[in-house]
Image (cartoon, rainbow, N blue to C red):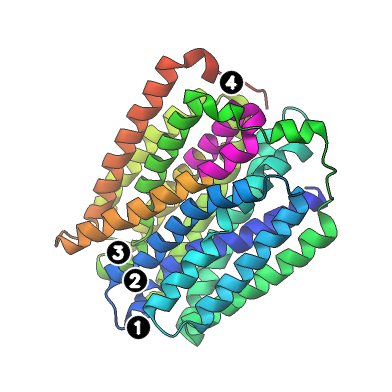
């Protein structure tokens, strides 16, 4: 891994930790701020909505700004937002701070993903992109469980202090390690929006929303499920999150290799197995070790699907890769908000918590149908093969 790619991966780790860490803190925040778990879940939805709104706005506002400068500006927003989370006096202030933090998310990851693919040798763009995004997945292995543990021992606010420190480290590494890029006629063409006129790009974005909705219907409430259905103690729940994060990391790396091999078949197969895994969790959730193993497999498959969709959209968008990549991060987080909302409604309706996995499976079935429609109607455009 090159030093610029390493700096981007560390930055992605910081952003991923900030996004996902809230899942492990929901029980503590709900008690500390005297709110229900579904209400605390709005911190997930609020962040996602911030990503959806901030992504297109910052992509347009920074379209003429050199990429390194744009990344530095976005990281400053990230740091300020997380500091505000730590200082928040109540739920409403915390929610606003989460939304503000999220404004930087989509544009940062979108620009960084495209930059990573440009750094890569020909034929290895997918792997380079997923290596960078591995920072996001490692956040689930290290950042989220560590943050959950710190939250248990020192309070949830201390967790956000750690995220601020990660942001400062990322800012320094981007400044030192990521090279500046001169603005040329070629780079101006790369920022063209003409690729967004292709219907396949928008079909892919809709599919990303659906895939993400399935993921976060389940993932948002995974800790309450472990505590109330599997009946594990809080520290074991942190360990379970780490194991799930390992699966997520493997899925992210696997997605890059599969994208460089056969994107079409890989996406369909991963979705089929994902559906089976979610249905199985309804029963395995009653026993701690089968539940954790099932979570790890689910995490692997979910992020494999996510990586494949990210690569697909960037390839199809062509000269509009920066915009499309940013929009896809926004689509992912729109699905995040929808999924968290759906999961909350399932809980409010009085269904058992593990019913959420069946709802997520149903959404994944709809996602698979959407993918098949894309491949059938645009088959020749999507048969993208690469060798290992």
The answer to which of 31 and 180 lies nearer the viewer is 180
Alpha carbon separation for disc pair 4 and 2 = 42 Å
For the stretch drawn in magenta, the main secondary structure is helix
The answer to which of 320 and 340 lies nearer the viewer is 320
User: In the rendered structure, which segment of residues is drawn in magenta?
Assistant: 305-328
Alpha carbon separation for disc pair 1 and 3 = 21 Å
Say which label, 1 or 3, has the lower sequence index: 1
**Residue topped by disc 2:** 40
**Residue topped by disc 4:** 384
Secondary structure type for disc 1? loop
Say which label, 4 or 3, has the lower sequence index: 3
- Residue 33 is labelled as 1
Decide: is 172 above or below 154.
Answer: above
| Residue at position x 56%, y 71% in the image | 81
Secondary structure type for disc 3? helix
Say which label, 4 or 2, has the lower sequence index: 2
Foreground disc of the pair 4, 3 = 4
- Residue 368: image quadrant is top left
Foreground disc of the pair 4, 2 = 2
Say which label, 1 or 4, has the lower sequence index: 1
């Amino acid at each position: 891994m090159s030093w610029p790619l390493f700096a981007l991966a560390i930055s992605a780790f910081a952003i991923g930790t900030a996004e996902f860490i809230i899942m492990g803190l929901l029980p503590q925040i709900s008690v500390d701020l005297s709110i229900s778990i579904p209400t605390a879940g709005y911190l997930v939805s609020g962040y996602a909505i911030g990503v959806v709104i901030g992504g297109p706005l910052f992509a347009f506002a920074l379209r003429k700004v050199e990429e390194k400068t744009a990344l530095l500006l976005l990281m400053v927003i990230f740091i300020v937002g997380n500091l505000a989370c730590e200082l928040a006096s109540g739920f409403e202030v915390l929610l606003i701070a989460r939304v503000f933090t999220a404004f930087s998310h989509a544009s940062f990851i979108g620009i960084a993903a495209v930059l990573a693919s440009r750094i890569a040798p020909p034929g290895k763009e997918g792997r380079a992109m997923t290596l960078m995004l591995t920072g996001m997945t490692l956040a689930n292995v290290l950042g989220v469980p560590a943050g959950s543990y710190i939250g248990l021992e020192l309070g949830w606010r201390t967790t956000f202090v750690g995220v601020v420190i990660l942001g400062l480290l990322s800012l320094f590494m981007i400044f030192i390690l990521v090279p500046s890029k001169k603005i040329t006629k070629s780079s101006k063409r790369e920022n063209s929006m003409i690729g967004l006129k292709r219907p396949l790009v928008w079909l892919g974005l809709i599919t990303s929303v659906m895939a993400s909705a399935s993921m976060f219907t389940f993932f948002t409430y995974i800790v309450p499920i472990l505590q109330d259905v599997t009946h594990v103690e809080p520290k074991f729940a942190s360990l379970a999150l780490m194991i799930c994060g390992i699966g997520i990391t493997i899925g992210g790396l696997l997605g890059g290799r599969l994208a460089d091999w056969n994107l079409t078949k890989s996406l369909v197969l991963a979705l089929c197995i994902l559906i089976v895994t979610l249905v199985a969790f309804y029963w395995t959730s009653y026993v701690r070790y089968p539940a954790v193993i099932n979570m790890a497999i689910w995490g692997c498959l979910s992020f494999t699907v996510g990586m494949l969709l990210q690569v697909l959209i960037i390839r199809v968008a062509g000269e509009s890769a920066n915009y499309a990549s940013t929009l896809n991060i926004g689509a992912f987080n729109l699905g995040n908000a929808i999924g968290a909302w759906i999961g909350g409604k399932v809980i409010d309706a009085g269904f058992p918590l593990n019913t959420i996995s069946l709802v997520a499976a149903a959404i994944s079935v709809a996602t698979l149908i959407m993918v098949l429609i894309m491949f059938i109607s645009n088959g020749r455009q999507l048969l993208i093969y690469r060798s290992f």
